[in-house]
Image: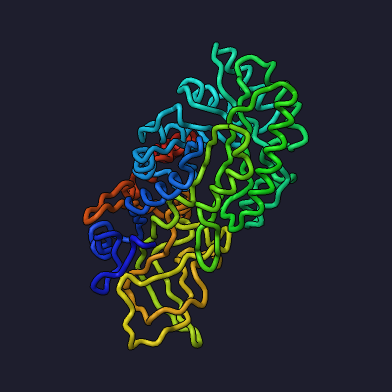
Amino acid sequence: MSEFRYCAGVLNAEDVPLDRIADEVGTPFYCYSTTRIEQNYRAFADAFAGQDAQVCYAVKANSNLAVINTLVQQGAGADVVSEGELRRVLKAGADPKRVVFSGVGKTPEELVYALEQGIRQINVESASELDMLSAIASAHDQEIDIALRVNPDVDAGTHAKITTGVRTSKFGIPIGEVRAMFARASMLPGVRPVSLALHIGSQLTELAPFEVAFGALAELVEAIRSDGYAVSRLDLGGGLGVVYSNETPPSVNDYAAMVKRTVGHLGCSLILEPGRFLVADSGVLVCQVLHVKALDARAIIVVDAAMNDLARPALYDANHAVLPVREASEDHSLVESDVVGPICESSDTFARSTPLSPLVTGDLLVFTLAGAYGAVMASTYNTRLLVPEVMVRGDEFSVVRVRPDYDELLALEKMPQWHQKTSARGAA
């Protein structure tokens, strides 16, 4: 959060006061620091200097075109999980040869589109997907590099809803089946098995699960090579955690050293897919206090942002620190406060019993580390409008996703023809 700091008593994004943006854009809104995104990318890429590694940003973390383009300009490729994300990264200027298509449920139409764009690699997650891709590629007289995604049966030690590498999860091919499937893939038309892929989960705060998984992957590479097949590339996924509250994730340098220690001897080129690490602390969600309710010794702060704008607290009990845009006065005692949204569900709660200075209607608050899995997971639940996204660089800001109006939202829907006939009969 180094690019978000108080200046003259007001929280700034780089050199732009957040209350100035609120005055011009309205609340709630997301705000991203360009500088912070660039710094995070450079820290990650520099940690792998000397290793044959390509950083492919995991677009699912934040798919705003301006965010993607910022990373593309720094040299990043992209990891996508849908045709929509692939279209986004291409529109944002990504080189198709630096794009990897992951995901457990790709449709035939998505595979055709990916083949047409000439992307670098498709990560295959099942025998049926392998057969489908082979048939589609050969029917289109094409051939594409593939990786088989390995499920190593390693518990990432993170939240159950973002753990992806245990045997019972829906992701990947059980590690004991990969060797035979790699051999079968080598015989199929339209596909070139050159790689193994692995991703065991998100928001990992220890190296040990990575080390176990990468060690198992290295042994599998050796076994496949002993069968006479070449494995020249490894896709190691992402998952490196960030500090939301009191976590102590490893540094990216320690992570890079572990990667080199576990798979460096194989001579494979590497694909790395950080998402959260690159963008989480680049963004905040800014909202306004609507009402303050007193309850015993606590305050209930009702804000104009809701769980449809930032879903992580409701989904994962995630913690996003709450800060006032106007710096708290030292002569005010702190009040235990619950910060809640306006939706009629108890899960629409951002923070419980958090100490805040006394607040009144109209005060601005921010939720920190909202750059990852924030706006990208938002919905129009309760017919609430999607909030705008703003990007800052230095003393400038730009709206990079506008707030739609209600007419635009409702224009996506229409009445069925029998309603129109009923209305016509009633009019007669």
Q: Position of residue 80 (x, y in %)?
A: 50, 36
Q: How is the image coloured?
A: rainbow
Q: Indicate the quadrant containing the N terminus: top left, top right, bottom left or bottom right.
A: bottom left
**Residue shown at 36% from the left, 64% from the top:** 287
Splitting the image into 4 quarters, where does residue 214 fall?
top right
| Position above or below: 296 against 400 | below
**Residue shown at 46% from the left, 77% from the top:** 300
User: From where the camera sits, is residue 344 visible?
Assistant: no
Q: Position of residue 75 (x, y in %)?
A: 39, 37
**Residue shown at 68% from the left, 32% from the top:** 221
**Residue shown at 57% from the left, 58% from the top:** 315
Depth order, front residue of 362/376: 376
Depth order, front residue of 166/383: 166
| Position above or below: 280 against 116 | below
Q: Position of residue 183 (x, y in %)?
A: 72, 22
Residue 190 left/right relative to 243: right
Task: Report the number of discs.
Answer: 0
Residue 361 left/right relative to 173: left
User: From where the camera sits, is residue 10 visible?
Assistant: yes
Q: Indicate the quadrant containing the C terminus: top left, top right, bottom left or bottom right.
A: top left
